[in-house]
Amino acid sequence: MKRRSIAIDGPAGAGKSTLARQVAKELGFLYVDTGAIYRTVALKTLRCGVDASQSQQVIPLLDHLDIRMDYGPDGGQRMFLEGEDVSQAIREHQVSGIASQVAAIPAVRDFLLEFQRKLAREHDVVMDGRDIGTVVLPQADVKIFLTAAPEARAKRRLLELEQRGASADYDTILRDIIQRDEQDRSRPVAPLRQAEDAQLVDTTALNLAQSLQALLAVIKEKIVL
Ligand code: DC
């Protein structure tokens, strides 16, 4: 049976993971958060004391990298590094910047490419990331580029952190978002960009429910469910 795939790309904080998860639930597809996979590689470099900006230090780690993924009872994606559940640890702020650095290394991207494609061969997927529509699944049935103004993304992130009881500062968050966007857009391999055949969805002025409706409308135009 031909598997169906929905690629959702876009910058950090546009609501990709929340929305992609909801879309997957609605359609009964598997949700794949590819950022979490890059974050797990980043955590490995951090734990090994390796400088993630130096590709020659990171590449040898790939030979023995033991990464696994599964889905918990609530349907949430869990990441395992050497058998340890690191789903929480990879969300640490420090890991975000390192993930963006390791994601710029071509050997890391090549290493993870087959991992991601295999998932799409075996399941109907909603996959979110930066290069899903352009590189990982260029034949995806639906491609969406989800974005929002940096200020809107920073505000949402601030709210999320405050709700979790974490202390946060708007200016720092905004600066980090802009810096990470720049790093992800300007790297030579698989940079963050909208695929030519992707539909742009800008959520700056939309709340979560409206964003979900906008995404489902695009999807229903392209595939028969
Ligand atoms: O979506 P996220 O913030 O969890 O992603 C972490 C980093 O991984 C992000 O800076 C860019 C990178 N990434 C990537 O390069 N390609 C992907 N498909 C997913 C994430």
Image (spheres, grey):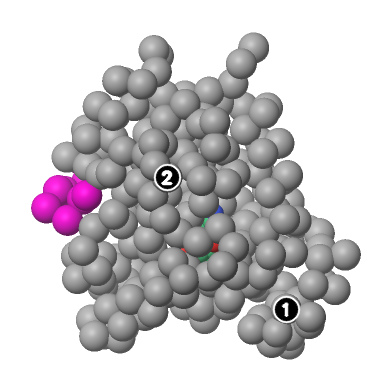
Name the quadrant containing residue 137.
top right
Asked if 61 appears above or below 54 in the picture, the reply is above
Question: Callout 1: few (<14), some (14-19), or many (20+) C-alpha neighbours within 10 Å?
Answer: some
**Amino acid type, residue under disc 2 in the picture:** Ala
207 within the magenta span:
yes
Q: Residue at x 54, y 37 (%)?
A: 138
Image quadrant where one finds the C terminus: top left
Of the image marks 2 and 1, the number of the one nearer the N terminus: 1
**Amino acid type, residue under disc 1 in the picture:** Ser
Tell me which secondary structure the magenta stretch mostly adopts. loop
Q: Is mark 1 within 8 Å of ligand 1?
A: no
* SS state under label 1: helix
Q: Residue at x 46, y 71 (%)?
A: 186
Q: Residue at x 79, y 72 (%)?
A: 59
Residue 50, x across and y down, in percent: 73, 85
Q: Residue furthest right?
A: 63
What segment is highlighted magenta in the picture? 202-209
Q: Which residue is mark 1?
A: 55
Name the residue nearer the viewer: 47 or 171: 171
Q: Distance between the Cα atoms at labels 2 and 1?
A: 27 Å
Asked if 92 appears above or below 120 in the picture, the reply is below
Q: Which residue is mark 2?
A: 195
Q: Residue at x 59, y 21 (%)?
A: 3
